[in-house]
Image (cartoon, rainbow, N blue to C red):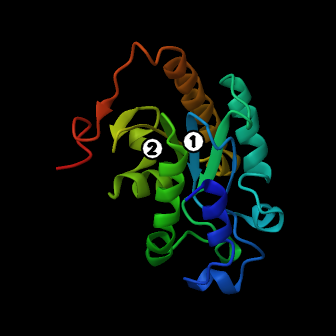
């Protein structure tokens, strides 16, 4: 299956309750051969209307942060854990995440990035399959299933809590340093980080 075929297969998904309220499925956008993939939580109002992830205020901030790390949207691929907007932008429910997770895992497999940057709690918890707090592990990097995973705060959190903007900028500075020195830096495994076991 190609990324285009996956996108087409997901566009009419009716597997969970979110299908009845969405305007459209928001699968992902960006470079299909990206070495860096960003994973957020779920589409918001603007994403649901336009069919692309991170196009609202949080998306504008993400674009600025990418630029600060020497990246552009053309360099990366951006997706979300779930592909349909939850009503009133509520948090995704566990069964919604489980329903959508196979689509995300297929995206990761098809893009095969070197680095996965998770944005917020839901993305890192989905990648680890474990309840962790983003505020405790943000800015670290470690290996999960052969990928270098870099947990970061979600841009929307920075819009709602001013002090998080500084922390998110710090996350992207660390990402830039990490990318500049990737050949020198060996990621710890999730097990070494104490995230499993």
Neighbours of disc 2 within 10 Å: few (<14), some (14-19), many (20+): some
For image coordinates 44% across by 50% down, the residue present is 124
Quadrant, the N terminus: bottom right
Comes first in the chain, label 2 or label 1: 1
Is residue 96 shown left or right of residue 53?
left
* Residue wearing tag 1: 37
Is residue 15 shown left or right of residue 12?
left
Q: Residue 69 sits in which quadrant?
A: top right
Work out whether 182 lies above or below 137. above
Residue 39 position, x and y percent, is 56, 50
Q: Nearer the viewer, residue 94 or 37?
A: 37
Between marks 2 and 1, how big is the CA–CA gap?
A: 20 Å
Q: Nearer the viewer, residue 190 or 1?
A: 1
* Residue wearing tag 2: 135
Residue 154 position, x and y percent, is 59, 47
Residue 139 makes an appearance in the image: yes
For image coordinates 16% across by 50% down, the residue present is 197
Q: Residue 21 sits in which quadrant?
A: bottom right
Work out whether 64 lies above or below 176. below
Mark toward the viewer: 2 or 1 = 1
Work out whether 177 lies above or below 191. above
Q: Name the element at disc 1.
A: strand
Q: Name the element at disc 2.
A: helix
Neighbours of disc 1 within 10 Å: few (<14), some (14-19), many (20+): many
Residue 193 position, x and y percent, is 26, 37
For image coordinates 72% across by 78% down, the residue present is 22
For image coordinates 67% across by 58% down, the residue present is 4
């Amino acid at each position: 299956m190609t990324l285009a075929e996956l996108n087409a297969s997901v566009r009419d998904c009716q597997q969970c309750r979110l299908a009845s309220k969405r305007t459209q499925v928001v699968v992902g956008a960006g470079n299909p051969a990206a070495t860096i993939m960003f994973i957020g939580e779920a589409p918001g109002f603007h994403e649901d209307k336009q069919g692309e992830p991170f196009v609202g205020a949080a998306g504008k901030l993400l674009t600025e942060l990418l630029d600060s790390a020497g990246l552009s949207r053309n360099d990366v691929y951006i997706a979300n854990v779930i592909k349909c907007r939850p009503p009133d932008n509520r948090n995704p429910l566990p069964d919604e995440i489980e329903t959508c997770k196979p689509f995300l895992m297929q995206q990761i497999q098809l893009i095969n990035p070197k680095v996965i940057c998770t944005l917020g709690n839901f993305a890192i918890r989905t990648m680890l399959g474990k309840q962790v707090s983003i505020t405790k592990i943000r800015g670290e990097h470690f290996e999960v299933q052969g990928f270098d995973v870099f947990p970061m705060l979600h841009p929307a959190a920075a819009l709602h809590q001013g002090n998080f903007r500084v922390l998110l900028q710090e996350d992207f500075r660390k990402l830039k340093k990490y990318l500049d020195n990737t050949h020198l830096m060996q990621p710890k495994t999730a097990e070494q980080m104490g995230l499993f076991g």
